[in-house]
Image (cartoon, grey):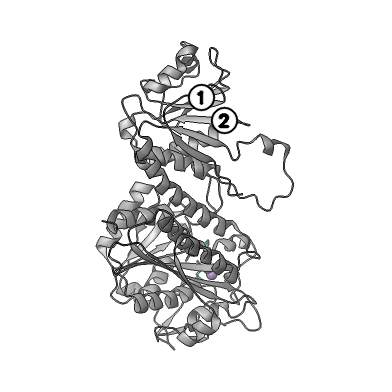
Amino acid sequence: MAISPKIVISDLKAPVNGTLVVITDEDLEFGTASKAALKPSGDLFQRVAKIEKFKGKRSKVLDLAAPSGLKLEHVLVAGVGKAKDMKAEDWLKLGGTIMGRLPAAARNVTVLAELPGGKLAAGDAAQVALGMKLRAYKFDRYKTKKKPEDDEKPHAVEVKFGVEDVAGTKKAWAHASGVGDGIILARELVNEPPNVLFPAEFARRASELKKLGVQIEVLDEPAMKKLGMNALLAVGQGSERDSRLVVMRWNGAKKKSETPVAIVGKGVCFDTGGISIKPAASMEDMKGDMAGAACVTGLMHALAARKAEANVIGVIGIVENMPDGNSYRPGDILKSYSGQTIEVINTDAEGRLVLCDALAYTNERFKPKLIIDLATLTGAILVALGQEYAGMFSNDDKLAERLTEAGKVTGEHVWRMPLGPVYDKMIDSKFADMKNTGGRFAGSITAAQFLQRYVGKTPWAHLDIAGTGMAAHNTEIGDSWGPGWGVRLLNEFIAAHYEK
Ligand code: BES
Ligand code: MN
Ligand code: ZN
């Protein structure tokens, strides 16, 4: 579990044994050190490339096993196509692809991270290393029987990462590996089963960020009751496990009094639907209904680990939604922290109830520059956008644009969806200020309209990550069920706009 290779940044010295990874382009050229390392094998690479029709295309890898003339076990030649077209995300994917192609039992691995035409920028090199780290992650804590081939897998390998700019890359890697640890933390939280990761345990794990200098406050049920967070508390009411709200603060800005950015996450450790119970099929997936909170926690880890020069508040509402004799019911009317009342139509529309109190509290207490929330909020967003884009809803064009841009840089894409008075009307209630569902149509939008009623005029963006935050498919950077989605997106967003 959480195996990550030890990445050691060093100079461009090639190994004499083990596995060597070199980079080539569509002209099948190499950097100086790589060329020198391959020289004793003569035209072996060119001949194999021809036979295998290897053209050095992006993310294609050619494996030269037991290359004649060299004592090496393997030379992996990784293609980048046109090097100048490679963006940060492409370098990340390249690293992941390389990790995935490391031969079984590879122990002594060296990557010569250099380019045919010149040097590889430190930031890009660090992305390659990050891709390797993320691809190596496995969640197998609960498997008690090792398979015979497990010993053969490239686990816990030490990777020597040769670069021209050693000092620059070391610095870039110190940052990128911190982000990697944040992503891996988010993945762990999403992957953990709901009997292990219940609200108090989630809060305990978030509290461990204290070690990195994050200030932590945990509100328990009596504290939330006193504050009037009755919407959040209603969701947890039917559960044996008590709810929590965790406030995480990273004060890294040069100006300590700088107004913070706030990130809020939905943390439903398990969503049965409550009295409006869900069908049995795939209900086990609802252990991932805390992916928003996991992202916030992973992001706070990342920011602290790389000592981000920004003031950021992370707030997570953590509950379990269960049916019980004490559960909240359809028909109940709740008075939320903001004072607005909510008629419960469906106890399975619980995420917005958790978030409305977390959002209103965050907004009132911290008066942040802006609020971004992340939530596995609606099945409808999966219908609309699948697992490729998160749905984004915002009351602020600049914020929406910046998030879209950060999505393009990181490959964690967001797609803006509409908000408006006509949709807002759909959640008006006969008996209270609003109801918690808006009917069959536009389910993701009416959910967002609900949240908008709790953020006032503060610039706000809501990311519906029901599609992107869990049950991920395999990619270059890993096959984790919980992908840790959003950590890179928000890390990039903060780095690009709030650390200047
Ligand atoms: N956690 C679910 C949304 C969800 C569905 C997340 C699939 C991930 C994958 C949420 O709490 C929920 O149940 N939403 C309902 C809302 C409805 C009752 C208005 C939904 O989407 O069906
Ligand atoms: Mn639900
Ligand atoms: Zn839910």
What is the distance, in whole Å, between disc 1 and disc 2 at their CAs? 9 Å
Q: Classify mark 2 as within 8 Å of ligand 1 or not, answering yes or no.
A: no
Q: Are marks 1 and 2 in contact (CB under 8 Å)?
A: yes
Tell me the kind of residue under disc 2: Asn
Give the answer, above or below, for where 84 lies relative to 444: above
Q: Residues within 10 Å of mark 2 (few under 14, many from 20)?
A: some
Q: Position of residue 109 (x, y in %)?
A: 53, 31
| Residue 435: mark in rendering | none
Res. 465 in view: no
| Residue 298 position (above or below residue 6) | below
Q: Residues within 10 Å of mark 1 (few under 14, many from 20)?
A: some
Q: Residue 314, percent across and down?
A: 42, 67
Query: Which label sits on residue 15?
Result: 1
| Coordinates of residue 253 in the picture (x, y in percent) | 31, 62
Q: Quadrant of the C terminus?
A: bottom left
Is 202 drawn above or below residue 345 in the view shown? above
For this orientation, the residue located farthest to the top is 42
Q: Which mark is residue 108?
A: 2
SS state under label 1: loop
Considering only order in the chain, which callout, 2 or 1, is on the residue closer to the N terminus?
Answer: 1
In the orientation shown, which residue stands out farthest toward the bottom?
A: 431
Closest to the observer: 479 or 131? 131
- List x then y, in percent, for residue 491: 38, 55
